[in-house]
Image: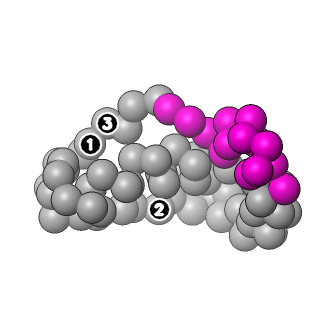
Amino acid sequence: MQKIKIKEGAKIDDYKAYGSLTNRVDEFLQETKPLVSGMKNCTIWMINSTATGGGVAEMLPSQIRIIRSLGVKI
C-alpha cells in the first residue's frame, strides 16, 4: 500500500461560483452539516487498487478535496 498526495484544487465553496450550482451547494452544506459534526474526531481512509488511471482513481482526488473542505480528516 502506498500513500498518494492529493494536490490542492477546487473546494466545495468554489462550486458556488457557477450560478446554476449555488443553490445545490447550499443545500449540500446544510444536509452534510450534522454528518460532518459527528465525524470531527474520525479519520476516513479511501483505498483503491491503483494510484492512477481508471475511473475511481481519477475521481477520488476531487471527492477527497470536497470532503476535506467540509472539515473531515481524510
Residue 22 in the image, given as x and y percentages of width and height:
81, 49
Residue 63 x/y as whole percent = 48, 54
- Answer left or right for 39 relative to 65: right
**Residue drawn 46% across and 47% down?**
62
Judge whether residue 58 is colored magenta. no
Q: Is residue 33 visible?
A: no
> Is the Cβ of the residue at disc 3 closer than 8 Å to that at disc 1?
yes
Mark 3 vs mark 2, CA separation in Å: 15 Å
Question: Could you say which quadrant of the image residue 11 lies in?
Answer: top right
Residue at the spot of label 3: 5
Relative depth, front residue between 58 and 49: 58
Q: Amino acid at mark 2?
A: Ile
Secondary structure at numbered mark 2: loop
Residue visible at 27% across and 61% down? 55
Looking at the image, which residue sits at the far front?
20
Q: Say whether residue 8 is left or right of residue 55.
A: right
From the viewer's perspective, is the residue at label 3 or at label 2 nearer? 3
Q: What residue is disc 2 on?
A: 44
Residue 39, x across and y down, in percent: 65, 64
Taking the spot 47% from the left edge, 62% from the top edge, the residue there is 44
SS of the residue under disc 1? loop
Magenta-tinted stretch: 9-23
